[in-house]
Image: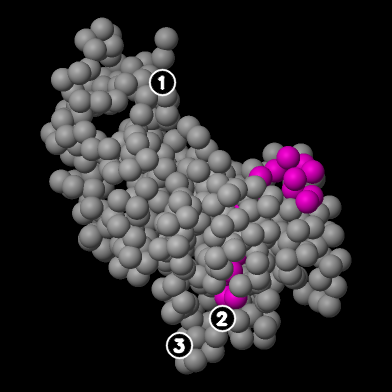
Amino acid sequence: MSERRLWTGAHLVTFAGDRDWGLVPDGALLTEGEALRWVGPRAALPRALCEGLADEQDLGGALVTPGLIDAHTHLVYGGERSAEFELRLQGASYEEIARAGGGIRSTVAATRQASESALHTLALARAQALMAEGLTTLEIKSGYGLSLDDEAKCLRVARRLGEAGLTVRTTFLGAHAVPPEFDGRQDDYVEAVCQWMPILRDQGLIDAVDAFCERIAFTPAQTRRVFETARGLGLPVKLHAEQLSDQGGAALAAGFGALSCDHLEHLSDDGIRAMADAGTVALLLPGAYYFLRETQLPPIAALRAAGVPIALATDHNPGSAPGLSLLLMLNMACTLFRLTPEEALRGLTVNAARALGLADRGRLVAGQRADFCIWNAAHPRELSYYFGRNPIRGTVMGGRTRA
Ligand code: NIG
Ligand code: FE
């Protein structure tokens, strides 16, 4: 039998139901191997479960939440784009920079030049920054290689980060931008992406497929082609949708049963309805909204009214969101998007898990993975209230305290 460990004196945020925090003031968590065996009020803990424990810890009233999940990042890349940031501050738009050959393409050049081990060193440091704030599951997209070899290189780096004490999910984003060697041959590039997909899938490098559907990236028809290929391979899809303009991408993705549609500042009512019908998660990215000085808010109230689950992520990337703080995303989701602190934390736990198609995490209930964070905080709303302050006390990953 796997080892059992007990944590008591925990102020639990379980998210056990569909509403509210699911608070348990004097709670206990019992883990068995990598899973939660029992969660609830200390006083109700069955004594029989407490025999032969490998370890027991009293947390003295500390707050315990599910482990944090970053369900949208572009963590593996070379170079940085601070010069572009300066250009934007002087008035150039993200779109203008992209059209002039900067933007994603400049990161593609730097990523192609970088060795696999150099990319790993850079990405590991970024993952560690996120882990320092309680990250336990991390999604990483490709999309800065844009050739078969360079996409494979980036996806291997992403996979290898899973050795660092976290779960990694990889997403193939070949349809992120058109690389220079395909200039003027956008449809040919989309065909190439579709040909690479089964090869990368067979190498065990893809858990899901994403695309950037936008006037500076790929059309809905090209996005459909990518999604049809993914569907043929049994791979779930997600989409960078309606970030800069309404392309009808969300409805298209929902038609393919997308796990999530991400960004969504320009999402229409039709898109919302389609997402609600398909059970697609709205993955909001306040860091990109903030950093691009966007003024068009995603339609939060309408998403809420339609019952679309809302998740949050950092969108970490060198162009639109170079931040590495999930706690800051909680704060920004409240201040900029007017989410409640409870909606925001659900967005980094329960709904983030759903955006990755992971049913085994995101809540503190028996049977889920034993991934949780211990915080020096009295109430969970404090996690979105402070910014630039990290109240973490410890992270437990698969039942073991992470060093
Ligand atoms: O999620 N929108 C497309 N992709 C990224 C930005 C990539 C970049 O600028 O390098 C995003 O915002
Ligand atoms: Fe993104």
Residue that appears at 73% across and 40% down? 234
Residue that appears at 68% across and 76% down? 215
Q: Which comes sooner in the sequence, label 1 or label 3?
A: 1
Amino acid identity at mark 3: Leu
Q: Which mark is residue 146?
A: none
Q: Which comes sooner in the sequence, label 2 or label 3?
A: 3
Image location of residue 184, percent across then percent down: 83, 77
Q: Quadrant of the C terminus?
A: top left
Residue that appears at 78% across and 51% down? 228
SS assignment at label 1:
loop
Circle 3 residue: 89
Q: Mark 2 touching mark 1, by CB under 8 A?
A: no
Label 2 – label 3 distance at C-alpha: 10 Å
Amino acid identity at mark 1: Gly
Label 2 vs label 1, nearer the camera:
2
Vertical order, 217 against 4 (above or below): below
Quarter assignment of residue 203: top right
Q: Mark 2 touching mark 3, by CB under 8 A?
A: no
Circle 2 residue: 94
Image location of residue 13, percent across then percent down: 27, 39
Quarter assignment of residue 198: top right
Q: Is residue 347 left or right of residue 8?
A: right
Task: Specify start and end residues of the magenta stretch as a single range.
Answer: 228-245
**Badge 2 local density, few (<14 within 10 Å), some, or many (20+)?**
some
Residue lying farthest to the bottom in this orientation: 90
Q: Nearer the viewer, residue 188 or 357?
A: 357
Label 2 – label 1 distance at C-alpha: 47 Å
Circle 1 residue: 33
Amino acid identity at mark 2: Tyr
